[in-house]
Amino acid sequence: MLDTHVRKYCQPWLSRLAQGLVPLGLRPNTVTLLALAAGLGGAFALYQQLPVLALTLLWLSGLADVLDGTVARLTGESSPFGAFMDLIFDRVVEMCYILAIVIPAPEFAVPAVYLLCSIIFSFSIFLASGALIGKRSEKAFYYQAGLAERTETFLIFSGIMVFPEFTTLLLNLFTAMIVFTGGQRFYEVYRYFHTE
């Protein structure tokens, strides 16, 4: 939700930051790989019980994640493979953070499994709708906004790191948000194919 509604206010600042990266020779896919590396490093830091470092690397990963697309547009190097990497690496970072929460603290295993199931549910709808609707329009990939997007993910993970005593509550809250988002997307697809 925040990605969709707040991005337009942040985009001028992100564009200026991306313009500073282009002269350094950083290509969009390199920025995507940096986002992955920061995310994996942050998950490992969380596993090692270093929440401040984990939090810092999480948000650096998020910053690189939004900059790669802007760099791609500035350099004219947007590519389907770049979009593919971005989509997959985001999920890898999320999975690693969930594992970093659960492995040292097995008492969070059940809410974590519910969360992972909700991600599979919602992301399956996201991918299927993108493939089906994308074939019927001029867009390369159909993007569905929803209650739980990337920024909400970062906020939930940040909340867990800052307030670990609320981990179960935050995992369950995030699961509910993602299930709701999946429902939103399912209904949107239903309406799309029944109002043509």
Image (cartoon, rainbow, N blue to C red):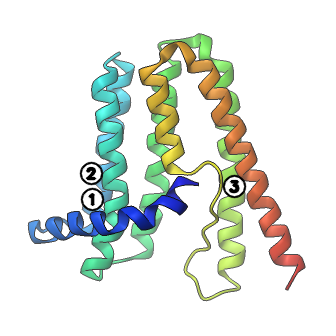
Rendered image: mark on residue 167: none
The image quarter containing residue 168 is: top right
Using the image, determine if residue 43 lies above or below residue 69: above
SS for callout 1: helix
Using the image, determine if residue 160 lies above or below residue 137: above
The residue lying at 60 percent from left, 17 percent from top is 108
Residue 60 x, y percent position in the rendering: 29, 44
The residue lying at 27 percent from left, 51 percent from top is 34
Residue occupied by mark 2:
34
- In the image, farthest residue toward the right: 194
Residue occupied by mark 3:
124
Using the image, determine if residue 162 lies above or below residue 65: above
Q: Taking 50 as reference, is 187 left or right?
A: right
Q: Taking 195 as reference, is 22 left or right?
A: left
SS for callout 3: helix
* Spatial separation of the CA atoms under disc 1 and disc 2: 5 Å
Residue 73 x, y percent position in the rendering: 32, 78
* Spatial separation of the CA atoms under disc 3 and disc 1: 26 Å
The residue lying at 48 percent from left, 28 percent from top is 159
- In the image, farthest residue toward the bottom: 138
- In the image, farthest residue toward the left: 24
Residue occupied by mark 1:
31
